[in-house]
Amino acid sequence: MSDIARADALEKASIDASVEGLKALLLLNGGACIALLAFLSATMGKEHPIAKEAAFVDGATKALIFFSIGAGLSVVTCVFAYLANQAYSAHMRDRALYPRHWTFGTVWTRLGLMSTAVSLGMFFWGVYTIWSSAG
């Protein structure tokens, strides 16, 4: 296998891994939202919640915000990836017409990496919020 073929295979593998990672982030945060909404709907129907349960519901409600932001950011990351790929391909097709698009693609890529990290951070922040309210 030549170096070019190996580089192409590695690039395809990295793209596949990033797609799976974004799916996982969306599933993590979206699944947490769905689970918390189900929990909150069951808990809110009670007439007299206990004080500890009320504190947990408060923490779960706050965590729902973090999980929602995390899910939204995983979708935003896909938009950044699309914009980066469009910028890179425009530059490669016609460098004279799109001389700065490689730089634009790099900016979109970095924004995508940052939104991915923040999305994962929102998941952990949501988990911590629930954990700290349970104690």
Image (spheres, rainbow, N blue to C red):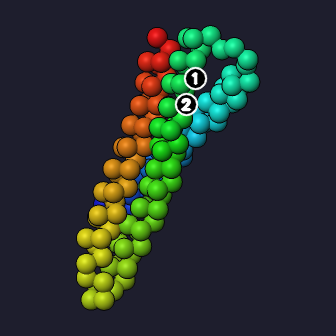
77 shown above or below 45: below
The residue that label 2 is drawn on is 61
Q: Residue sitting at 30 percent across and 60 percent down? A: 3
Amino acid, disc 1: Val
Using residue 4 as the reference point, say whether residue 126 is left or right of it. right
17 shown above or below 1: above
Badge 1 density bin: few <14, some 14–19, many ≥20, Cα 10 Å: many
User: How far across and how far down the image is residue 99, in percent?
Assistant: 25, 82
Q: Residue furthest bottom?
A: 97
Amino acid, disc 2: Thr
User: How far across and how far down the image is residue 109, in percent?
Assistant: 34, 60
Q: Residue furthest front?
A: 48
User: How far across and how far down the image is residue 4, in percent?
Assistant: 33, 64
Q: Which mark is residue 57?
A: 1
Q: Nearer the viewer, residue 40 or 126?
A: 40
Residue 124 lies in quadrant: top left
Q: Nearer the viewer, residue 79 or 54?
A: 54
Q: Is residue 29 visible?
A: yes
Mark 2 residue element: helix
44 shown above or below 76: above
Badge 2 density bin: few <14, some 14–19, many ≥20, Cα 10 Å: some
Q: Are marks 1 and 2 in contact (CB under 8 Å)?
A: yes
Q: Residue sitting at 50 percent across and 38 percent down? A: 65
54 shown above or below 6: above
The CA span between labels 1 and 2 is: 6 Å
Q: Residue sitting at 44 percent across and 55 percent down? A: 77
